[in-house]
Image (spheres, helix red, strand yellow):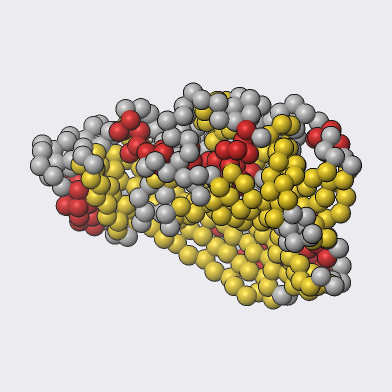
Amino acid sequence: MIDESVIAATLSTALGSGGDFAEVFAEDKRAASALFDDGKVEELSSGRDRGAGIRVVVGDSTGFAHTADLTPEGLERAAKAAAAAARSAGAGTKVADLSRVDTTPQPVRIAPESVDKSRKVELLRRADEAARSAGSAISQVAARYADSRRRILVANSDGVFASDDQVRTLMSVSCVAVGDTGMQTGRETLGATVGFELFDEHDVDEVARRAADRALTKLAARPAPSGTMPVVIGRGGGGVLFHEACGHGLEADLVNKGASVFRDRVGELVASPMITLIDDGSMAHEWGAFAIDDEGRPAQRNVLISEGRLVDYMWDGLRSRKAGRASSGNGRRESYQHLPMVRMTNTYIANGEDDPDAIIADTERGVYVAQLGGGQVNTATGDFVFGMTEAYLIEDGVVTDPIRDGNLIGNGPKVLTNIDALGNDFEMGSPGTCGKDGQGVPVGDGTPTLRVTELTVGGTAG
């Protein structure tokens, strides 16, 4: 993408007026998308964006500049601008010899950009037909396709010189069903860090029918109950709760700011002894996977909580330098126009030993959540509210009627300690985008079936 000698010269310029650290992050990203809404193509777009972001660190000050001009002159101007923003007195720092880091990008069999647009539109048309065939109550269907190829190069004054080629493919189907209870919605998303072969491995018709079935099921749903009760979260359906209400509190930047309930608690028991929480950017093909993070650090598997005990936080380069330790490979950014920060990758609770059916049978009365929706979280306290997009009553140890219009209200750390059953049926959930400080990055999450002894269910039933 950029010649190595140009990278070295740019780093020298960035450090020319004094600096502790300099970094060049170059990116070349192609993306395509299509939307099939209500029986017709509403959007068909593609684009390319390339450029570089240059970071200079001087003491506690960070200077940053980005440019779409990847010529030596353009990079030099950006390097000087970043240095000026971070400049302080002191001798310049020499750039270490750049040494390439060997990486193995996620293998791709069918490059999405090699596939004709008509095939992508045909997938969406099939999804539309399959969703509508689920029942006459399905009144609206919107199917979206998206793919991207993101090539990055990271070099810094510590001698890192690494690159990655990240390909992601995604499809989602949203349905609206109309009945006596008004309009109900259902959604299903399929996505992975793979190429167009995603659709050789997954049935588009089945994805669409699952979205339609969710909407149709809610037409017969009862209003959700209210009160405190046991809640069983199905496999893959509740990972977002642990991502939002627990994972963010384990990010080193929030910990350092004092905005985390997990601060100064390494070594303490913070969860049920059956809980092991992991963040793993190296999970092959998962939505949050990559070969290197956006600071050139190889992706790795990081155990954050082991058998209930807090082991470590997630770290990016800046925070780990100050702490005198290695980065955990969690430095990520939305694009070359953004600074990196601590971000999750694929965050999940590891498998337990319990039979999922036995967990439900052992629950006399409660709620079974098959899929959680969006929510709000206070990362400083872990307090959360999440909507339940697919949920059912548990009565006398059996999953019975579907429920609607309900929320889960609680506290993330307290949920971790109140898990008393953990299934052996781990599954990753739907791909997602994590938003933080205005930046979005792809992430994954997952859980086995688990039971929380008591959670507040906010419903409309008496």
Residue 32 percent location from the top left of the image? 55, 62
Q: Is residue 13 left or right of residue 36?
A: left
Q: Residue at x 31, y 33 (%)?
A: 321
Residue 13 percent location from the top left of the image? 17, 46
In the image, 242 versus 416, the foreground residue is 416
In the image, 408 versus 446, the foreground residue is 408
Q: Residue at x 85, y 72 (%)?
A: 180
Check the picture and name the quadrant holding the C terminus: bottom right
Q: Residue at x 32, y 60 (%)?
A: 68
Residue 280 percent location from the top left of the image? 55, 35
Q: Is residue 122 above or below residue 432?
A: below
Q: Is residue 358 left or right of residue 319?
A: right
Residue 218 lies in quadrant:
bottom right
Question: Is residue 325 visible from the viewing direction of this image?
Answer: yes
Q: Residue at x 43, y 34 (%)?
A: 263
Q: Is residue 295 left or right of residue 184?
A: left
Q: Is residue 432 above or below residue 156?
A: below
State how many labels appear.
Answer: 0
Q: Is residue 170 above or below residue 57?
A: below
Residue 106 percent location from the top left of the image? 55, 40
Question: Is residue 427 visible from the viewing direction of this image?
Answer: no
Residue 326 lies in quadrant:
top left
In the image, 280 versus 201, the foreground residue is 280
In the image, 257 versus 9, the foreground residue is 257
